Amino acid sequence: MKKILLFTGALLLVVAALYQCKTKGAATASATDAAEKAYVAPGTYDEFYNFVSGGFNGNISVYGLPSGRLLRIIPAFSVFPENGYGYSEETKAMLNTSYGWLPWDDQHHISISETDGLQDARWLFGNANNTPRIARVDLSTFRTVEILEIPNAGGNHSSPFITENTEYVVAGTRFSIPMEEKDVAIDSYKENFKGTLSFVSVDPQSGRMKLAFQVLMPGMDFDLARGGRGPSKDWMFFSCYNSEQANTLLEVNASQNDKDFITAINWRKAEEYMKAGKGRRSTSRYAHNTYSEETHSATTTWETEVLTLDPTELKDFVYLMPCPKSPHGCDVDPTGKYIAASGKLAAVIPVFSFDKMLKAIEDRAFDGEYNGLPVLKYDAVLHGEVQKPGLGPLHTEFDANGNAYTSMFVSSEIVKWNVESLEVLDRVPTYYSIGHLCVPGGDTKKPWGKYVIAYNKITKDRFLPTGPELTQSAQLYDISGDKMKLILDFPTIGEPHYANAVPADMIKDKSVKIYKLEENQHPYVAKGEKETKVTRQGNQVHVYMTAIRSHLTPDNIEGVKLGDDVYFHVTNLEQDWDIPHGFTIRGSKTSEILVMPGETQTLYWKAEQLGVVPFYCTDFCSALHQEMQGYIRVSPAGSNVPLKYGTGDDMVQ
Amino acid sequence: MKSGQALEGRNLPATHPLTFDSFSPDFHHIFFCFKTSRAGFDSFSLAFFVFPMARRAYDSDHKLAVMCRPKLAVFKLFIQLKFCCMKACYAALYVLLLFTLAACGGSDATAEGESAPAPQTPEEKMLAEGKGIGEIKFVELKTPLEAERIDRGKAIYDMKCAACHKLDDKKFVGPGWQDVTKTRKPEWIMNMITNVDVMLERDEEAQKLLQLCLTRMPNQNVSIGDARDVLEFMRSNDGEE
């Protein structure tokens, strides 16, 4: 009997093993399913790069999708002590503005460069919302290589949206202001305040930006923008609110009108006016900062010229389309035929037809004027309204199958609807209060689709609590089927606003691995230890230093005097991928510098105390990284200690 | 075996530690661990399944190591099974259980027998001849030395090599270069310069140097043409004319 029992037991064990095997994953099908979709095995790559605006951290973060792993932070408008951006002598100039050197900004939106309405992923543009600027990031180095300040603007929110071939990147002011910084009474808004919509041209080869012209608009708040594509490629659309022209308590006073506007600008026509020498030229001082990968240094050029086009004088290139209740998002679908506008306070999502707009312009179907600008008839330009979409529609992205995805801030959900039929197809909750959303390539002619990512404003109970200040978050939904499915929550840094995603294959293979030493044109480069030296010019001491695993040359420096300004120009002699060296010195009042292979970066340090001061490599570079260190001796101002330096036995005097 | 496969394509250090992997999440209490070799992942077999042993790992060169931590109940059942007289049935079930486990988790793993020694590949032949491994199969040396090459080689040496290699016979970070052209074949030198990561992985002489210096020689992104110039400079440094 016992044996039978045992045998039965053993048999059961086998059956149980088989059963477990068969039903593996089935019991928790949905969770496992979601986990599998977001799972990227250790050692393998993600499918997409997700470029996410950093909001109040001022920089741009890069995540992998579908894993949600943070890959990199690209410093743009805020200093980044982690690698010395904004602190090193080479990068300081990137943060110059007409208001002085600014260590911070608020980064809201990004655009990936396009050719023929499709991502070419050469550059990424980002806006600075507070002190108006546009940054250009080179996607082969993931570095900010250019920042252009936008003059005559109160804040740069409707930016940096681009035209179909990246001919222009736009910068629409959020806050209208008195032009030429006039000292006027704030309540003279209606009389004195103007808004500018700037068109910045982008050189198709170098990417270099230039402020081409500014369209002078009535005082309002300009919110978001989108370039047309296909049939509408010559147009740019801006949403605007505060057509009431309120200057105080906008929460109430800018919500009075039943309709605000979508401003449609025929930029091609504006360009013709510019080329014909029309418009008014004026002077305004603004910073244009560029970073050279040859000299590894940024320089500021002070621009002065501004061309203003006034649409009340130069006719027929600006039209206003009435849009219900303080529109926010203003998004053009992949066909370029429809513009979805989201009235934050509206109960519907109006969708405008580009064809109808052209016809209404041709038929002069105007509903009067607003400050001298023609207002088109709402019914004449409307494709239709999405009924009962949800509460608080903000932004819309598109897939390649004719569907739109709109974020609903108040009702915390994403609503999927069909662009042609305007029928709501699906809705999923977000956790919580979604702001922007992103479908990979969702702002192009051919969206990559597959996912929609929600960037939420509130996370509350979704992650472990970390005191009063909580992580921000994103949520990844699979949209490959009829129904949207939540597959991943991932925390984000800063406060993400707009984002986009690019297939990994478009970027990863062109990623720069090293800077070639031979091509280094830095004025203080040491191409090899033979070129290392220490020179003195008055109170300035320049150290031409090299770093290679695992020593710095020179690592002993004497003859520095109290009060000297010491510049450590560190050249990383390595020529292999992923071997940066870092450098810092005790009492550094800036940050460390991280020096990539073949690059030169400079740390400034003032000798303010007598003594022998250690410096070292901050990036764990090799087995003997802890040995990568040195000393600098600071002697009294009048002392006769000679300048002497070297590594090992080769001290030079 | 996903993580194992992921590791396979990567450059594992010569002294890679044991890699642990489980058959499937469902059998989380049974762990199998495998020794990896430099060439990649060893094939595994279920030839022995040492059940009652709490921990036992074989760290021999190529053999399977097994670690088991069965749940207590299962363990007891098997202890009892041991005394079961229905040996045939028991053995059959045992095999069946093993088979089930193997089929369940190890579906994508195939057992590989010890392969017979293959004939020497061209790479192995080069290694055996002391030419190293890489694109440089044959270098033609000319005398007298080419002065232009020496100058170019010296410039590259100053920029990319001198930080670690001195020109005398003293070791600094790396070995001094004196007499290097007399002790190494020119092909070996140029492969070491242009293909250092693979050399450090496959070439015994290169590995000996790593053990001596303890700092991996960096890939300094020197082209084959530039490496040839450096070689000419080394010959000049060794007194050739």
Image: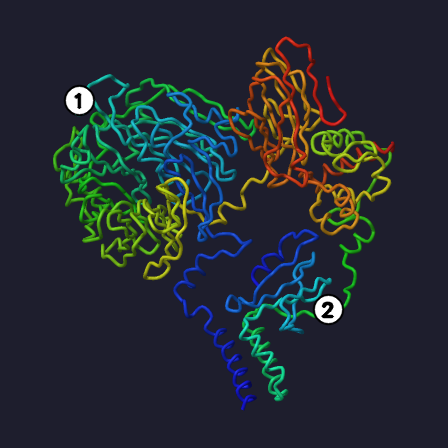
User: Most extreme residue toward the left, as rendered?
Assistant: A368
Residue at the spot x=12%, y=34% of the render? A368
Q: How busy is the neighbourhood of tag 2: few (under 14 within 10 Å), some, or many (20 plus)?
A: few
Q: Which residue is mark 2?
A: B114
| Residue B53 visible in the displayed image | yes
Residue at the spot x=44%, y=56% of the render? A38
Q: Quadrant of the N terminus of chain B?
A: bottom right
Q: Which residue is mark 1?
A: A188
Q: Could you tell me which secondary element the residue under label 1 belongs to? A: helix
The image position of residue A546, as x and y in percent, is 65, 28
What amino acid does circle 2 point to?
A: Glu
The image position of residue B150, as x and y in percent, is 78, 31
Q: Is residue B124 above or below residue A373?
A: below
Q: Is residue B217 left or right of residue A76?
A: right
Q: Chain of mark 1?
A: A
Q: Quadrant of the C terminus of chain B?
A: top right
Q: Is residue A238 left or right of residue B208?
A: left
Q: Which quadrant of the structure image shows residue A193?
A: top left
